[in-house]
């Protein structure tokens, strides 16, 4: 299964790396961790984040 790093995930979501780091710090999104303890996301994670953002926009 493909894993995306923070830069790739941010690009896919159309946000900056810093925005994604802020979301992680605030526990709004929870990444998995690789062997170096770096945050990584799966395609399913990216889809869930997109759904979450769309739900917020509808409020």
Image (tube, grey):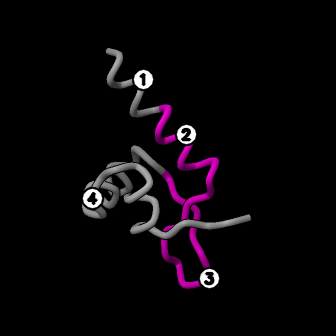
In the image, which residues are magenta? Answer: 30-51
Query: Label 1: how many residues lie within 10 Å, few (<14), some (14-19) or many (20+)?
Result: few
Q: State how far apart marks 2 and 1 are (Cα).
A: 10 Å
- State yes or no: residue 38 in magenta: yes
Tag on residue 35?
3
Q: State how far apart marks 4 and 3 are (Cα).
A: 24 Å
Q: Give the residue at x 39% y 33%.
A: 53
Q: State how far apart marks 2 and 4 are (Cα).
A: 18 Å
Q: Position of residue 28 (x, y in %)?
A: 40, 44
Which of discs 1 and 3 lies nearer the camera? The answer is 1
- Residue situated in front as seen by the camera: 46 or 35: 46
Q: Which residue is label 4 attached to? A: 16
Which one is earlier in the sequence, the residue at label 4 or at label 3?
4
Q: Position of residue 46 (x, y in %)?
A: 53, 49
Q: State how far apart marks 3 and 2 are (Cα).
A: 23 Å
Q: Which residue is label 2 attached to? A: 48
Which one is earlier in the sequence, the residue at label 2 or at label 4?
4
> Relative to residue 17, is residue 4 drawn left or right?
right
Q: State how far apart marks 4 and 1 are (Cα).
A: 20 Å
């Amino acid at each position: 299964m493909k894993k995306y790093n923070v830069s790739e995930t941010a690009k896919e979501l159309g946000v900056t790396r810093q925005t994604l780091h802020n979301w992680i710090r605030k526990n709004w999104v929870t990444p998995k961790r690789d062997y170096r303890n770096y945050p990584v996301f799966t395609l399913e994670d990216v889809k869930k984040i997109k759904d979450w953002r769309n739900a917020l926009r509808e409020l």
